[in-house]
Amino acid sequence: RVLSCKIILQCSIIRGIILESPSCTMPLIPSLLLLTVVMLASPARCQKVCPCAIRDSTVYYNTLVMDCSHLALADFPGGCIDDHTNEVSELLLSYNSLTAIRSTTLVDFQELQILMLDNNKLTFIDVTSFEFMKSLQVIDFNHNLDLILEPETLSYQYGLRFLSTIGTNLGQLPYINASAVLERVDIRSSELTSLRLELVNKKLSPPSFYFNCHGNEEIPDVAAMTLLDFPDDSIVNMNTGVHIWARTEEEKEALITKPWTINVDLVTAIKLCEVDGLPGDLDICFA
């Protein structure tokens, strides 16, 4: 009799009470009814509810914003994956308790252009987590205090325009030189110990470029060749006590005459490799 009623059982929950269809006239033992509902209810009727707010994007035409901020999430809610996921251009996960982004966590968001992960508790991000996001332009990791990023984490972000890692204790940036349209890199107070030699794309040509690594007291030395790859008219903020190591007089002169805005006195900050000594990281002079 229980099985004969499976077609008409409704997976309906009203104020926490499971209702039985009145057309199933024979009384059912409550435990059997509950078991039948759990086993036979249609997934379409019992699917998880997405707690995130979804609205039209005002930035990207005919796309959606999925706002999952301030929800105390420990993981990405599975109920938010549906047929419209590919219409989401902006995913906001700010101010939650996320600790990890695994390779499959966001795999359905292949058209994503803005990803906000700031103010979480991220300690692990799989190196392949973002490689399918070919349109990603903005990514914000701010204030994930124990964040670690593998070197190749952003290697597939050819359209990346904005990267922010403020207050992350990151130690080392991942490679960000895949993008030739990078406009803004804000890595203040990230506990960086060095800057990569080939930090940005050599063909970088945005309308403007802003780079701020102020507050990283553990960066004593920077290679001149790293900064020479920055476009003309760049705006650069660094710790004023940094030493910039040039390998040749030509590199030194090119930096001093570069048409950019930088808060460091280049005449006193630039050192010549071997002539003025050597940096702690010998790769700066010899790699």
Image: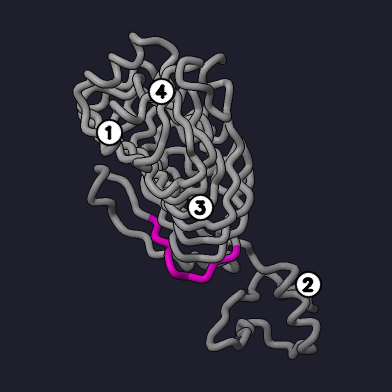
Q: Amino acid at mark 4?
A: Lys
Return the disc, 3 or 2, that comes first in the chain's sequence.
2
Residue lying at 67% horizontally and 68% vertically, measured from the top left: 41
Give above or below for 125 relative to 223. below
- The residue carrying pointer 2 sits among few (fewer than 14), some (14 to 19) or many (20 or more) residues within 10 Å by Cα, namely few
Residue placed under numbered mark 3 in the picture: 168
The residue located at (51%, 37%) in the rendering is: 173
Q: Secondary structure at mark 2?
A: helix
Badge 4 local density, few (<14 within 10 Å), some, or many (20+)? many
Between disc 2 and disc 1, the foreground one is 1
Residue 132: x %, y % from top left: 52, 33
Q: Position of residue 118 (x, y in %)?
A: 45, 56
Q: Earlier in the sequence, mark 2 or mark 1?
A: 2
Q: Is residue 152 magenta?
A: no
Give the CA separation, mark 3 to mark 2: 57 Å
Q: Which residue is mark 2?
A: 3
User: Which secondary structure, mark 3?
Assistant: loop
Residue 200 lies left or right of residue 146; in this view the side is left
Q: Nearer the viewer, residue 196 or 30?
A: 196
Magenta range is 66-74
Q: Position of residue 147 (x, y in %)?
A: 57, 51
The residue that mark 4 highlights is: 271
Q: 127 above or below 56?
A: above
Which quadrant does the C terminus fall into?
top right
Residue 27, position in %: x, y?
Answer: 74, 90
Give the amino acid at mark 3: Thr
Amino acid carrying mark 2 in the image: Leu
